[in-house]
Image: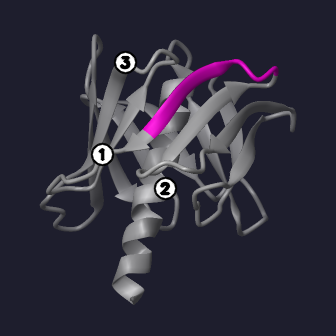
Amino acid sequence: MPTRYKIQQKLFSIGDDFWIENQDGKKVFKVDGKVLRISKTLVFEDANGKKLCQIKERLLTIKDTMVIEDPHGKDIAVVKKALITPLRDKWDVKVKNGPDLDVQGDILDHEYAIKQGWNKVAEISKKWFRLTDTYGVEIDPGQNDILILAIAVAIDMMAHDEDKKDKA
């Protein structure tokens, strides 16, 4: 059975903290938006405050790029927006010591899939919730849940940051 998580959609900004809940409504991961940093940084912690990973914005790159690091600051994945996106949003995820992932769909409307090759490993969707500011992440068994959740949050941050730039 896949595992579902619920994330309140926000236009993330530095200093924002939020919780990711499991399908039973239990708060399982806290995401702490760190202040006093030059680049955007979000730290994922378990319910007891133990650091699990962090997302950092990589500055001075051609494409939007976020790095996901383990608790010790070592890169575990790099998330980049694809330069050419003909019909759908597309993101590439280079996973260190693991298979790379592709993300495709309508990112701004939170309707997209995370795939390893042809196999879907996770789905992100708003259709599971009545609340308009909430979306779900459904992760297949055997996946690294915290990595998939970090990828979803990183893409959400980059997509909404891009949306804010387009309106400016």
Q: Which residue is mark 1?
A: 58
Residue 67 image offset from top left, x and y in percent: 35, 36
Residue 130 image offset from top left, x and y in percent: 78, 64
Callout 1: SS? loop
Callout 3: SS? loop
Q: Which residue is mark 3?
A: 74
Q: Is residue 92 left or right of residue 14?
A: left
- Is residue 108 located in the magenta-colored stretch of the structure? no
Q: Which residue is mark 2?
A: 156
- Which picture quadrant has residue 77? top left
Q: Residue at x 50, y 44 (%)?
A: 41
Please state which of the two labelled residues, at mark 3 or mark 2, is closer to the viewer.
3
Residue 153 image offset from top left, x and y in percent: 52, 46
Residue 66 image offset from top left, x and y in percent: 35, 44
> From which residue to which does the magenta span run?
48-55
Name which of mark 3 and mark 2 comes first in the sequence. Answer: 3
